[in-house]
Amino acid sequence: MHKVLIGSRSFGNIVKDGIELLEREGCKLIKNPLGRVLKEDDLIKLVPGVDAIITGMDEITGKVLEIAGQLKVISKHGVGLDNIDLDTATKNGVVVTYTPAAGEEVEAVADFTFGLILSIARKICSANESVKSGEWKRFIGAEIWGKVLGVIGTGSIGKAVIKRAKGFNMKVLAYDICKDQTLIDKFGVVYVTLHRLLRESDFVTLHVPLNEVTKGLLGAKEIRLMKKTAYLINVARGGVVDEKALYTCLKDKKIAGAALDVFSKEPPEGNPLISLDNVITTPHMAAYTVNSIREMDILCAENTLKVLNNEKLSNQYIANPQVYRAKTFQRNMTDKVGGDE
């Protein structure tokens, strides 16, 4: 019987499809006993004897991995791997899987991105709070129709955002290390340098993973390139933006506002950004729709079971395929030796 530690607070809490799949396969499930992101010290107590971890943003550090001697797979419920020590996992032969944005999740995040654009530009959140407090004050907002949208990262979510932008008759500038010719041909997307995108866009949206290249991608210098009337929307990772620089620019009205679904530290306790009137915030919920979570739960459970049961798993779901290939090779050699006997 495989022991599976479920750190993710989303997995199995909204829909039961993923949990039921693991239970049908006879897994012993250890659910998050703390109801919050598991810290290193928490995991050190929980991982001994565990075969798999299903994680959200839990701190799976090198120290945790060194103690988890029986661990075979870390299955990320989501995409970002910045909470996992991938190098140590790879060194220790632990397969790391994830659920790349596809289908329902892509559409959910793209919808949410435009929800944030509309909310920050038209001051919907401020107006809502004002009316509920007994006021009847009309807020002057900014138009979206026909404006310039700068999309940083044109992967699956960035593409979905671009499709929605065309419905608002927006001109789209894009920045990515890989140009997508289909976006150029079909939607008239113009790939430009990061600095040009920031200078010319009315709205800038972020759709990149957090890694060594993208960490602090937008610092003080970059943010100050933006128009004073421009808005920044971040549904990627908090660490992609220098939050101190962003706070200063927003406070000094160097840009018009920001809509943030993510922070460098979550929950953002004591983060001064949440105190600003020209910022709207949400609790990392861009992918949170019933269909999106169901899709992620099932894929996360399937990834876990395929590794535990030595079944074939596509490389598109594996962060360290070299480990999985090595395990597959070892299994095949064992099967051959067994057959010869």
Image: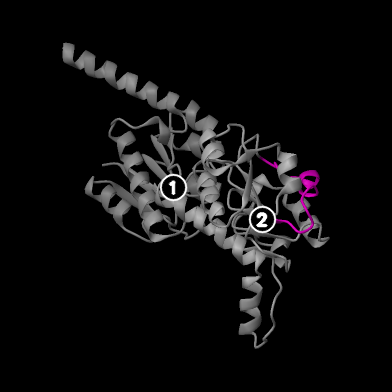
Numbered badge on residue 77: 1
Q: Would you name the residue on which mark 2 appears?
A: 147
Residue extending farthest right: 252
Q: Residue, x 52% and y 31% (percent of image)?
A: 88
* Main secondary structure type of the part rendered in magenta: loop
Q: Residue 280 vs residue 339: left or right? A: right
Amino acid bearing label 1: His
61 w.r.t. 229: above or below:
above
Q: Is residue 177 left or right of residue 202?
A: left
Q: Which residues are magenta?
A: 215-232
Secondary structure type for disc 1: loop
Compared with residue 166, is residue 92 higher up or lower down, i.e. above or below?
Answer: above
> Where in the figure is residue 55, as x and y percent of width and height?
45, 47
Is residue 151 magenta-colored?
no
Q: Residues within 10 Å of mark 1 (few under 14, many from 20)?
A: many
Which quadrant holds residue 14? bottom left
Task: Answer whether residue 227 is magenta in the image.
Answer: yes
Q: Nearer the viewer, residue 18 or 67?
A: 18
User: Mark 2: which amino acid?
Assistant: Lys
Confirm whether residue 199 shows in the render: yes
